Amino acid sequence: MAKDSPRDLADLVAGLDSRLAGADARLGREYPGARGDRQPVHSVYVPADRVGPGLAADWGAQALASLDEYAPEPADLARITGLDERAVADALPRVRAKLATEPVEDLRADFEDGYGAPGDEAEDAHTRAVAEAFAADLAKGAATPYFGIRMKGMEAAGRHRGVRTLDLFLRTLLEAHGSLPEGLVLTLPKITSVEQVEAMAWLAGRLERRYGLDEGRLTFELQIETPQSILLADGTVAVPRMIAAGAGRVTALHYGTYDYSAACGITAAHQSLAHPVADHAKSVMQVAAAGTGVWLSDGGSNILPVGTAEEVHAAWRLHAGLIGRSLERGFYQGWDLHPRQLPIRHLAGFVFYREAFAPAAARLRAYLGSVQGGNVADEPATAQALASVLAQGLRCGALDGGEVADATGTDADTLLALATRRVG
């Protein structure tokens, strides 16, 4: 039998490269890997008519006051939430510092379900006020890392008003701030067709030209809250087609708990982030977004911590359990709707990241070759996931750079590079 010569093998390899060139390019384009940006731990949705300068600091003060009133000691908070008391005691000083300095990571002025339809004159006034409030916070150095609006969507009933609000918001923000700030986020709700996402991408491009912005500057999130945003009429999965329809502008997928549950026939008493219909939708979102750089966000709890002490405690316990459940399932962002939800958002997150810290750091240190003899042989993808959870803990304040460097044997920059490196 004749043996292949080096030239023959080179021809084979060249042939394969030629045959797969299109697939290689498509893979790189459609699955670029994790983004290097900081993902917020939550989005705080506030009706647009209630948004003003200094809102985040005010919410932080209310959140701290609620801790003092309803859970003055770590043991109280552990008993209320069901979290481990030692973990709570370890995380609580960091939580208090977070509430004092950065209580809100992503603020969304809501012009949709949480706002209603007060009429054009009122909505125009609120739109200008929201943009001016954001500009005022930016000028004072008090802006949240991310902020923006959820306008009415592309459905026929609200389409014209949504476009009017978005255009007026951008114009007022540009006039008040002088430029389009980093951290601006737009949320597209009530999506019922791929064409609506295409239309939003088209609109973003037209607005960029209208205001002299760089092409691709306007990006947006998709709120997945209708059955049509999960499954199309022909039985195909909608989410990946919607991400593609965004033409590189889609930054995140947000699960809309209550609209989606209601549309699937779930009665109000059983609508929850933990319902099977929610888990199915979020699993589809998770698979569709994997490797694309598009972030995932769970929804929120509408059981607010208000009323009697017992009612506040019950809401906190429910919220802590839902946040922990989301984090365990790879949803590192959620929604908050009330100042008293902030202590539990940050506490549950900090406990999660601090409990994940030691084992993740040890495995990562072994993977990086700093120590030998570990009993787990991790693959590159797992090492990336380990680095990612540590990077997320660092960014939100649950972990310190020094303790992570000591435990992993590497610095924060190397950790971040590993967390965002494309594997495969």
Image (cartoon, rainbow, N blue to C red):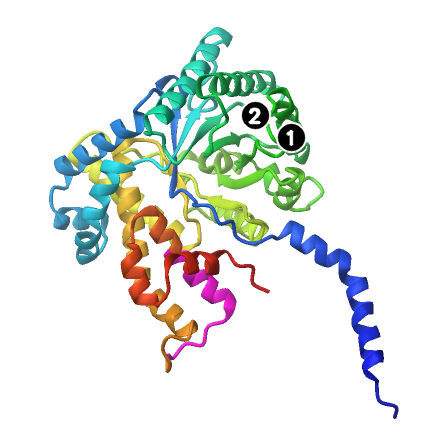
Task: State the residue lying farthest toward the bottom.
Answer: 1
Q: From the viewer's perspective, is 283 left or right of 22?
A: left
Magenta span: 374-390
The 10 Å Cα crowd at callout 1, few under 14, some 14 to 19, many 20 or more, is: some
The structure residue drawn at horizontal position 54% and vertical position 40%, both measured from the top left corner, is: 251
Say left or right for 270 vs 347: right
Q: Do the residues labelled 2 and 1 touch (CB within 8 Å)?
A: yes
As for residue 387 lying within the magenta part, the answer is yes
Residue at the image position 13 percent from the left and 35 percent from the top: 69
* Residue 27 rendering spot, x and y as whole percentages: 67, 55
Q: Residue 196 carries which label?
A: 1
Above or below residue 120? Residue 64 is below
Q: Does the magenta stretch include residue 40?
A: no
Amino acid type at circle 1 is: Gln
The first of marks 2 and 1 along the sequence is 2
Q: Quadrant of residue 46?
A: top left
Q: Is residue 303 left or right of residue 295?
A: left
Q: Where is residue 9 in the image (x, y as percent from the top left)?
A: 81, 78
Q: Answer whether residue 358 is visible to the viewer in this image.
A: no
Q: In this view, does 413 lie above or below 397?
A: below
Mark 2: amino acid: Gly
| Secondary structure under the numbered disc 1 in the rendered image | helix
Q: Can residue 34 be seen in this view?
A: yes
Q: Where is residue 67 in the image (x, y as percent from the top left)?
A: 17, 38
Q: Give residue 377's quadrant in the image.
A: bottom left
